Image (cartoon, rainbow, N blue to C red):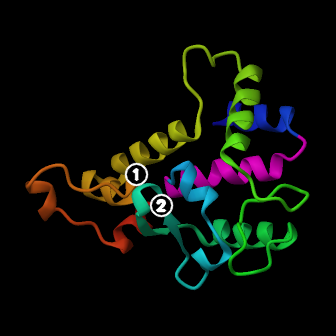
Amino acid sequence: LTDLADAIRATRRDPDLDLLLVRFHLETGALVQGALNLRRRDIDSTRSTVWLREKLDSVREQPASPSLVALLLAHASERNGSSEDDAVFRTRRGIPITDRFYDRLFARARRHLGWDHRTPLTAHVLRHTAITRVGRIAGYPVAQAFAGHAPPTVTGRYLHATLADVATAV
């Protein structure tokens, strides 16, 4: 992660946005679609959560640290995202990012790293890393809830993690 942060700082004109995206994925386990769909109205600073709208029209409340929540709101405000329906992640010109933005971000970082040929580097890998860490800290049911996954087995239906459990792990 340190290598990735260094590569982003060395290869971008807007490392603040790029590093905020990396932190967002590591802290929330969000899919790319969750970041692209994130609007100001989806950030609840009182509960310290974000509402992720991801694939197959899934919507879930995900805990985030108070410092990340504050950074997300400040980022949107500083970049012409003042309306409740405005996208949070925006370029310096105030334009919402796209999935193509992700492709370019990670392609640049991979070229700067010496180990990119043996270790994939994508937003999905960041999600995988986050889910793995939460699982190691708090166990399978919490990792499953953090990832927004349905239980894969009958027994899994009985192992529920609360929003508070996920928040504690985050």
Q: Is residue 49 above or below residue 100?
A: below
Q: Is residue 142 above or below residue 6?
A: below
The alpha-carbon separation of the residues under discs 1 and 2 comes to 7 Å
Tag 1 near tag 2, CB within 8 Å: yes
Which residue is depicted at the point 75% across and 20% down?
111
Callout 1 amino acid: Val
Where is residue 11? Give x, y as percent: 84, 32
Which residue is depicted at the point 63% across and 57% down?
36
The answer to whether residue 75 is left or right of residue 168 is: right
Which residue is depicted at the point 55% across and 25% down?
120
* Residue position marked by numbered label 2 in the rendering: 170
Where is residue 23? Give x, y as percent: 64, 52
Q: Is residue 9 above or below residue 112?
A: below
For this orientation, the residue located farthest to the bottom is: 46
> Magenta segment range?
13-29
Q: First in sequence: mark 1 or mark 2?
A: 1
Secondary-structure class at tag 1? helix
Where is residue 68? Give x, y as percent: 65, 65
The answer to whether residue 120 is left or right of residue 5 is: left
Callout 2 amino acid: Val
User: For the residue carrying disc 1, how many other residues have a C-alpha within 10 Å: few (<14), some (14-19), or many (20+)?
Assistant: many
Looking at the rendered structure, which numbered label has been put on residue 115? none
For this orientation, the residue located farthest to the front is: 56
Quadrant occupied by the N terminus: top right
Q: In the rendered picture of this protein, how many numbered marks are placed on residues? A: 2
* Residue position marked by numbered label 1 in the rendering: 134
Question: Can residue 43 be seen?
Answer: no
Secondary-structure class at tag 2? loop
Q: Is residue 162 above or below residue 155?
A: below
Q: Look at the image and say whether residue 15 sits in the magenta stretch.
A: yes
Q: Nearer the viewer, residue 52 or 44?
A: 52
Q: Nearer the viewer, residue 47 or 95?
A: 95
